[in-house]
Image: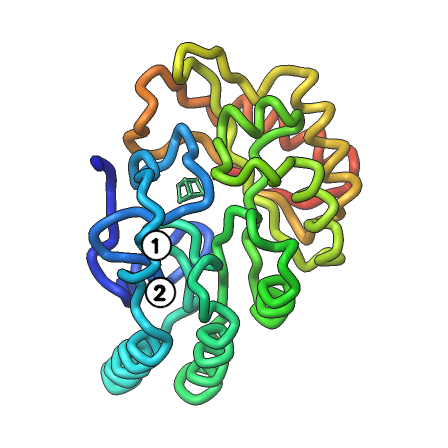
Amino acid sequence: MSGFLFNDMIFGPVKSRRLGNSLGINLLPTNRKFCTFDCIYCECGWTPEEETLKAELPSQSQICNALEERLLKMKINNQVPDSITFAGNGEPTIHPDFPGIVEDTLRLRAKYFPHAEVTVLSNSSTIHKDEIFNALNKVDNNILKLDAGLEATFQKINKPRSKDLSLDKIVQQLQKFKQKAIIQTLFVRGEAGGEKIDNTKPAEIVAWLNHIRFIRPRYVMLYPIDRATPAKGLEVVSKEELYKIADQLRDIRVKYSVY
Ligand code: SF4
């Protein structure tokens, strides 16, 4: 599999435009991607077919020990993180001990850097599970993916592995965060797998805005592609276009950031 992978369980801190000085936690294997989606633009490359990857996940205690070791070192070096961020080689919430790892992280944050925020970058595919929803409600920033207005486009862009997952199911669940959700949307057009894809078309934007209106998130992050993508026929949507889309968020009084 080609693509950019994080080689460590704990990585950074890295300078993030969104999160400032961000210390990353990768709950997934360090040598391959593990995800419930197979997004056409994923910087980690295509999602492997194998279903046996769970065995390669780091344990809760390994993660907790590695995180404490790094936070202690940062404390000694007076290196203060703005955010402790769950990100990495796939979808963090599929780790079977995700809720416990969130608890560990909150405890370690309070011990070493009480002013740092805890952030989770998630693709929203597991938020219908009570234990994941409850864990996410404990962190400061839930940055949750919503890349499409229409179901067909969701299927083409994000290519969910589970047939049970629909855009509508995700939208209904996102609304339950009651303004704690930060929505991230990547805008893209082009061709993948012989199909035309474009989530910037007027009908898409109308449907996407309806979802946003229903969810009432804390704010929305709008992005273009930033790195090499596994599908080769994709186009970077310009910042000007993203700002035009964002203007429509302003009309419905939803805050946003364009990246
Ligand atoms: S959800 Fe994220 S990690 Fe998973 S395929 Fe999409 S972009 Fe990649």
Residue 207 quadrant:
top right
Is residue 79 among the parts visible in the rendering? no
Q: Residue at x 69, y 42 (%)?
A: 169
Query: Which residue is tagged 1?
Result: 88
Separation of disc 2 and disc 1 at Cα? 7 Å
Q: Position of residue 43 (x, y in %)?
A: 32, 38
Query: Which residue is tagged 2?
Result: 25
Q: Position of residue 210 (x, y in %)?
A: 77, 32
Between 185 and 55, which is closer to the camera in this rendering? 55
Q: Position of residue 96 (x, y in %)?
A: 45, 66
Tell whether circle 1 marks a residue whose Cβ is less than 8 angstroms from ligand 1.
Answer: no
Is residue 62 among the parts visible in the rendering? yes
Check disc 2 and give the amino acid type. Ile
Q: Does residue 132 appear left or right of residue 230 in this picture?
A: right
Residue 15 quadrant:
bottom left
Taking 173 as reference, is 192 above or below it?
above
Which corner quadrant holds the N terminus? top left
Q: Does residue 16 appear left or right of residue 242 in this picture?
A: left
- Labels 2 and 1: the sequence-earlier one: 2
Q: Position of residue 35 (x, y in %)?
A: 40, 46
Tell whether circle 2 marks a residue whose Cβ is less than 8 angstroms from ligand 1.
Answer: no
* Coloring scheme used: rainbow
Dot 2 lies on which element? strand
Q: Are marks 2 and 1 in contact (CB under 8 Å)?
A: yes
Q: Residue at x 31, y 54 (%)?
A: 53
Crowd around label 2: few <14 · some 14–19 · many ≥20 (10 Å): many
